[in-house]
């Protein structure tokens, strides 16, 4: 079906040393058929402590801390080279780990390499600030590494979300301890192999899959860790933010979403249908930015939704290694069960299932964690499935009558991560986009990304921004200098008398 590559052997990368974990067992499976990828022992608190001790030593070593920015940038380029040389291998491992299509995981791996290159370029072109003095002194503000950074990531796009944290944090001169999710431990271990081969001094990078409550908690609580970068669910993020606040540690939180997609009557309908399908059903809906709430202007609603349903039913659901597949299995059978239960509850609450709403009946897909792309209608905005993140291929659709109404209804949600607007009237797109509380607005497109463009959420979708030139600064401490230019003692002291 495709070339195969060896999976990482399951040892952890503990401060530059490959070691068997001593924490709870992790069973990584391939969700397309339930077969075993690897059984491994996750990191225990003791493993985490060892990684932290090695990171403290490596980060303080002048061999790293004393490097000039352009010298640090070379390591990032070498990591990017290593990722690019291994795209097929990384894609294979990530598809086994997550069930995603090889087409998607190949693109995610390529984007991870670009993330390292981008932050290498930012590092080389970043200036320090000379500020305006109000006396006879020189004032400067410089940026320094924070020390140790904990990066905690979810399972849905591991290599890309790992790179978004690891690249700027290393670029800033820190050591990084990465904890991937237990459903997808393998691709981060492959990243460790690449980082090691790039010659990064040992100790500066660790990969510690393991239980959130065990090694994850340690990484947040430990006094040596000075910064948390978290991507994951809102309830986990809220808990970790409280822990970070206890030790006054800055934390960026990329959390969940329930993003509105708005189709005005003047929209290019084909453009909108293609974008909406991609926005909700690519990655099998397991995307924080999935456009999962669809509002369609009433005058075109029935025709538009009928066309959308037909297009959804034509999507090819299939094996992640089949190049024709658009909708692959979900990450795990347990996750599919959760999504199916939410759809069942919506059905019992009166939802009309316009398409999907079940696993496919194709016997060839029976063993996998597949779920059909699903569109639900006939629910009030207050219904749980209209308010809560499903993190699966489930779209709720509803009509609207006016611009003010759709803005109010879009904003009437706890999340604020992304939004899609489909119209030929650009001033209206601008007005509506400015009025919606969200981190990202897509106009006549959806789910496009540039590493140069900051990304993050509002409300319960999180705090802080990743990407963009300022991305490195988020992992640095700012220090200001006042340097005397007079050579004269301060008159207040009256000294020398
Ligand atoms: P999750 O919150 O369950 O887990 C995320 C990470 O946190 C995992 O590595 C997990 O092991 C760890 N963790 C859990 N409990 C912990 C604890 N007590 N201490 C320390 N670490 C702990 O999320 P998930 O199910 O892996 O991922 C899905 C969620 O991620 C969705 O809500 C999705 O919206 C969100 N997400 C957000 C973005 C974004 O950029 N906004 C991107 C991708 C995914």
Image (cartoon, rainbow, N blue to C red):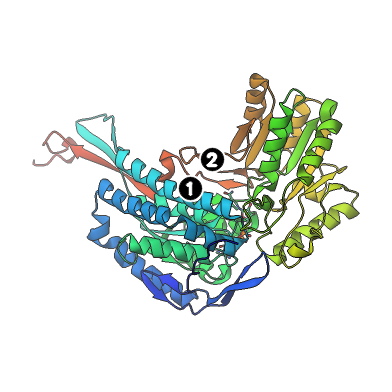
391 lies above or below 16: above
Read off the residue under disc 2.
449
Point out residue 21 in the picture as x, y percentages from the top left corner: 48, 77
Residue in front for this viewpoint, 420 or 393 = 393
Point out residue 117 in the picture as x, y percentages from the top left corner: 38, 46
Residue in front for this viewpoint, 166 or 116 = 116
Q: Residue at x 36, y 58 (%)?
A: 147
Left or right of 216 in this view: 265: right
**Badge 2 density bin: few <14, some 14–19, many ≥20, Cα 10 Å:** few
Left or right of 304 in this view: 319: left
**Ligand 1 visible in quadrant:** bottom right
Q: Residue at x 57, y 51 (%)?
A: 103
Q: Can the viewer see residue 179 in this picture?
A: no
Res. 268 image quadrant: top right
Q: Quadrant of the N terminus?
A: bottom right
Left or right of 487 in this view: 435: right
């Amino acid at each position: 079906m495709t070339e195969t590559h060896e999976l990482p052997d399951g040892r952890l990368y503990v401060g530059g040393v490959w070691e068997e974990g001593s924490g709870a067992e992790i069973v990584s499976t391939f969700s397309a058929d339930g077969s075993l990828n690897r059984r491994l022992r996750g990191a225990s608190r003791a493993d985490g402590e060892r990684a932290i001790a090695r990171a403290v030593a490596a980060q303080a070593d002048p061999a790293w801390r004393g490097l000039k920015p352009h010298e640090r940038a070379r390591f990032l380029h070498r990591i990017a080279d290593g990722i690019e040389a291994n795209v097929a291998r990384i894609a294979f491992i990530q598809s086994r780990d997550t069930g995603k299509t090889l087409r998607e995981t190949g693109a995610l791996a390529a984007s991870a390499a670009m993330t390292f290159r981008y932050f290498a370029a930012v590092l080389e072109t970043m200036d320090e600030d000379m500020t305006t003095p109000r006396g006879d002194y020189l004032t400067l503000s410089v940026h320094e590494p924070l020390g140790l950074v904990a990066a905690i990531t979810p399972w849905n796009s591991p290599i890309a979300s790992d790179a978004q944290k690891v690249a700027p944090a290393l670029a800033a001169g820190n050591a990084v301890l990465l904890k991937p999710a237990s459903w997808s431990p393998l691709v981060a271990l492959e990243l460790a192999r690449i980082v090691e081969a790039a010659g990064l001094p040992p100790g500066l990078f660790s990969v510690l899959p393991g239980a959130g409550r065990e090694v994850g908690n340690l990484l947040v609580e430990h006094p040596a860790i000075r910064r948390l970068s978290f991507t994951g669910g809102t309830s986990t993020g809220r808990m970790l933010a409280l822990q970070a606040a206890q030790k006054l540690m800055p934390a960026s939180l990329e959390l969940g979403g329930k993003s509105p997609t708005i189709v005005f009557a003047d929209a290019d309908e084909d453009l909108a249908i293609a974008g909406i399908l991609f926005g909700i059903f690519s990655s099998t809906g397991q995307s924080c930015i999935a456009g999962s709430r669809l509002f369609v202007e009433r005058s075109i609603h029935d025709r538009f939704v009928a066309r959308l349903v037909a297009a959804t039913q034509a999507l090819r659901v299939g094996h992640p290694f089949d190049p024709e597949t658009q909708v692959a299995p979900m990450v795990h059978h347990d996750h599919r069960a959760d999504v199916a239960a939410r759809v069942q509850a919506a059905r019992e609450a009166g939802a009309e299932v316009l398409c999907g709403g079940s696993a496919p009946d194709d016997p060839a897909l029976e063993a996998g964690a597949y779920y059909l792309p699903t569109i639900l209608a006939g629910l009030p905005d207050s219904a749980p499935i209209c308010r809560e993140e499903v993190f699966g291929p489930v779209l709720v659709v509803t009509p609207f009558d006016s611009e003010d109404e759709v803005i109010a209804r879009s904003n009437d949600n706890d999340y604020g991560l992304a939004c899609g607007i489909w119209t030929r009237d650009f001033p209206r797109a601008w007005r509506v986009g400015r009025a919606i509380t969200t981190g990202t607005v897509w106009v006549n497109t959806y789910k496009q990304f540039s590493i140069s463009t900051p990304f993050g959420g509002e409300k319960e979708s999180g705090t802080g921004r990743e990407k963009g030139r300022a991305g490195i600064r988020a992992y640095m401490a700012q220090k200001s200098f006042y340097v005397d230019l007079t050579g004269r003692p301060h008159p207040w002291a009256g000294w020398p008398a």
